[in-house]
């Protein structure tokens, strides 16, 4: 960038050159130093969302509750013959998806939406998309309560050997999400169409992911190409959730196939691949973010 | 002296897009390129701010002074050159910029503190100081959207000055709040200066620069045109305004032309040392008494005096603030006596101007100009203006005579 030679003036050690792009390591250190801000911005997003509302957080519980009630009534009472306990199958996949899609759209708009802050104060900009993820995370855990209550109410047993796999599955999902949110938040500053494009992409992505329909219904039809379906990174995480919570690979006495009848290691292998790819993406996203960050304050 | 901020050859180039098209369609049509003009908001700026120094940045609108401050704060990344800073920087670029209207004062203090990089425990520790400084104890749990702009500014300023910054960047924010709060801010800034903290201040107010800055720099169209003593820089600033054909603010030419008359000067008398004699001898004392009347209580008061010779040269200009004389709130009538212990002047008639204004000089209450004069008669034959204390010793080789003047 520099077009003039930098003069060699010795400055006291400890002085920080604010004009150079920080290294990824330095970025990570800055984010850690500003973790308090991350917590506060997450809190702010949650508070502002439910400002002046009487029910507050109850609203975020009502959404999955409504799904639960509607799908129970529709598929258990009016249209029996589908997946038994379809509401639980749906929520098992829908909750992580909602988390992913809310966090990604929130994260993409996080820098442009906080323009006033970005133009006036310095802080590590990565904090903004991370705070959107943080806020979505809180919603996810709150909404999961609905699922837990539903499992208890229906006396529905998840798969104990698969439950521990939920932790790496969720972490891999967060890594993948982090990479996308970081890159898109910076790109959206320069190309405001990104957020609208993303809305469309998320809708398509939702239907390409086995959430409302079971994985095997598509994978089996693809025959030997069935595993291609796992190239959709979200699928790897979603089917692990469904396997652990819905806990059925086949229904109707084996006639309807729902999920891959594989061991927990098969599921974990997919998660491992997702995590490795996500880490690579995250590094790439940091580089993209670092380059785009140069002019963020003036382009906003 | 170590430097707190080193600015070396800094330039910042902005792109002015002819059509502000951020959309993908536009980019696709133009293969990603949009027509733009390049514009250097700053070019080749070198400035070193030493630790403990207060430096003012003067410049007309669009001169790049705020851009420079944003570069120092790390908000803008300069296109060329480098800036090295030592220590924690707190930037007051726009008051309350980190505030969210829907959060309460308390929540915003924590949010704002963490934006400045403070851990929660630290904010908790200074929380009471912040609220007390802002004088918002009763309103701290109210959403800040219900605050008046003065309350908003007070809270923001209170957070920034209580986070214990080593370097404080201030952009035109001292002109907010009521008189009393302005005085408090100024007092806090002077306290900072005594503690040896570094301040970089962007302002239009020439008086403020004279009052609190050790040095000042003048920017004109992105170039640094003058760095020097405050008085010198203010003159240079005035020149750039004139050269640009811009209006020179009144305060640069005639400080305090408008008067509010919240306090009125009711009279002034000159007290010569010997009764009945209406002149001074060189080196004699003189007391100048000014009486005033304040119909209502005024908190922010500075009494000022200027003495000019017949050609209009300012011989003395000072005030109670410069001399660190504490003037409390003023109400009713009163008197101020300026006791000049010695008047070291030779023959002439000298003009005394008196004034009452507030601390930053932005408000003039009253002034009395070209009404009071005193005369000095020199019994000796020395000519000139100043009665220098003088001893002359002359030694010639053999005769060795001495003479005294």
Image (cartoon, rainbow, N blue to C red):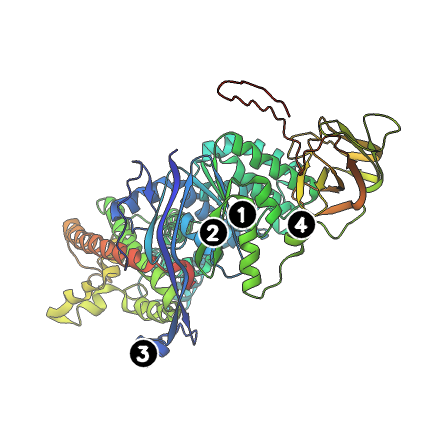
- Disc 2 or 4, which lies upstream in sequence? 4
- Disc 3 versus disc 1: nearer the observer: 1
Dot 1, crowdedness within 10 Å: few (<14), some or many (≥20)?
Answer: some
Residue B370 % position (x, y): 79, 46
Rounded to the nearest angstrom, the CA distance separating label 3 from label 4 is: 47 Å
Of the two numbered discs 2 and 4 in the rendering, the one whose residue sits closer to the viewer? 2
Whether residues under marks 3 and 1 lie with C-beta atoms below 8 angstroms apart, the answer is: no
Asked whether A164 or A75 is in front, the reply is A164
| Residue B2 picture location, percent across and down | 37, 34
* Location of the N terminus of chain B (image quadrant): top left
Circle 3 residue:
B28
**Image height of B211 relative to B196, above or below:** below
* CA neighbours of label 2 inside 10 A, class few (<14), some (14 to 19), many (20+): some
Q: Are marks 2 and 1 in contact (CB under 8 Å)?
A: yes
Residue on which disc 1 sits: B232
- Mark 1–mark 4 Cα distance, whole angstroms, equals 38 Å
Judged from the image, the secondary structure of the residue bearing numbered disc 3 is helix
Residue under mark 2: which chain is it in?
Answer: B
Quadrant of res B239: bottom right
The front one of B162 and A34 is: B162
Indicate which disc residue B148 carries: 4
What subunit carries mark 4?
A: B
Question: Which is more N-terminal, label 4 or label 3?
Answer: 3
Q: Quick check: B42 left or right of B276?
A: left
Label 3 – label 1 distance at C-alpha: 53 Å
């Amino acid at each position: 960038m520099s077009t003039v030679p930098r003069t060699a003036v010795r400055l006291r050690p400890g002085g920080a050159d604010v004009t150079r792009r920080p290294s990824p390591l330095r970025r990570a250190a800055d984010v850690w130093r500003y973790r308090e801000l991350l917590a506060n911005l997450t809190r702010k997003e949650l508070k502002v969302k439910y400002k002046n509302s009487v029910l507050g957080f109850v609203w975020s519980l009502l959404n999955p509750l409504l799904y639960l009630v509607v799908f129970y009534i529709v598929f258990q009472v009016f249209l029996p013959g589908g997946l038994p306990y379809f509401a639980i199958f749906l929520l098992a996949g829908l909750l992580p998806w909602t988390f992913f899609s809310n966090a990604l759209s929130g994260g993409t708009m996080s820098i442009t939406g906080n323009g006033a802050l970005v133009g006036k104060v310095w802080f590590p900009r990565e904090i903004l998309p991370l705070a959107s993820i943080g806020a979505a995370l809180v919603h996810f855990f709150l909404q999961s309560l609905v699922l837990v209550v539903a499992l208890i109410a229906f006396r529905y047993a998840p798969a104990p050997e698969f439950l521990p796999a939920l932790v790496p599955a969720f972490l891999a999902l967060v890594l993948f999400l982090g990479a996308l949110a970081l890159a898109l938040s910076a790109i959206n500053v320069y190309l405001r169409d990104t957020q609208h494009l993303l809305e469309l992409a998320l809708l398509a992505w939702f239907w390409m992911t086995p959430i409302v329909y079971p994985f095997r219904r598509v994978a089996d039809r693809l025959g030997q190409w069935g595993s291609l379906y796992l190239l959709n990174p979200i699928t790897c995480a979603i089917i692990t959730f469904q396997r652990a919570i819905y806990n059925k690979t086949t229904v109707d006495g084996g006639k309807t196939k729902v999920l891959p009848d594989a061991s927990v290691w098969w599921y974990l292998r997919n998660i491992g691949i997702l995590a490795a790819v996500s880490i690579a993406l995250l590094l790439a996203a940091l580089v993209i973010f670092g380059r785009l960050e140069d002019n963020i304050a003036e382009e906003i | 002296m170590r430097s707190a901020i080193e600015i070396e050859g800094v330039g910042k180039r902005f792109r002015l897009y002819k059509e502000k098209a951020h959309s993908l369609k536009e980019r696709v049509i133009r293969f990603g390129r949009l027509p733009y003009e390049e514009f250097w908001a700053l070019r080749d700026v070198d400035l070193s701010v030493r630790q403990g120094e207060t430096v003012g940045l003067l410049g007309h609108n669009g001169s790049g002074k705020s851009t420079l401050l944003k570069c120092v704060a790390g908000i803008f990344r300069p296109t060329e050159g480098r800036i090295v800073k030592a220590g924690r920087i707190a930037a007051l670029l726009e008051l309350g910029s980190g505030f969210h209207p829907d959060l309460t004062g308390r929540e915003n203090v924590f949010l704002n503190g963490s934006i400045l990089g403070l851990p929660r425990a630290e904010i908790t520790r200074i929380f009471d100081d912040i609220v007390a400084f802002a004088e918002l104890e009763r309103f701290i749990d109210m959403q800040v959207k219900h605050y008046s702009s003065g309350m908003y500014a007070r809270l923001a300023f209170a957070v920034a000055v209580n986070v214990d910054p080593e370097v404080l960047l201030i952009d035109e924010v001292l002109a907010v709040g009521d008189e009393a709060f302005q005085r408090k801010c100024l007092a806090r800034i002077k306290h900072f200066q005594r503690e040896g903290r570094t301040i970089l201040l962007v302002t239009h107010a020439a008086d403020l620069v004279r009052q609190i800055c050790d040095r000042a720099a003048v920017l004109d169209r992105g170039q640094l045109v003058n760095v020097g003593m405050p008085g010198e820089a203010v003159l240079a600033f005035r020149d750039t305004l004139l050269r640009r054909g811009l209006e020179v603010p009144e305060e640069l030419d005639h400080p305090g032309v408008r008067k509010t008359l919240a306090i009125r000067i009711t009279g002034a008398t000159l007290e010569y040392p010997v009764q009945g004699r209406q002149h001074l001898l060189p080196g004699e004392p003189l007391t100048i008494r000014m009486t005033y009347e304040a119909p209502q209580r005024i908190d922010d008061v500075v009494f000022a005096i200027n003495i000019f010779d017949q050609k209009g040269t300012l011989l003395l200009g000072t005030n109670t603030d410069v001399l660190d004389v504490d003037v409390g709130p003023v109400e009713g009538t009163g008197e101020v006596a300026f006791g000049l212990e010695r008047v070291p002047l030779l023959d002439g008639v000298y003009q005394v101007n008196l004034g009452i204004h507030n601390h930053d000089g932005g408000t003039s209450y009253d002034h009395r100009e070209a009404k009071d004069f005193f005369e000095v008669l020199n019994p000796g034959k020395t000519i000139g203006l100043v009665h220098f204390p003088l001893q002359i010793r002359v030694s010639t080789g053999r005769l060795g005579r001495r003479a005294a003047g």
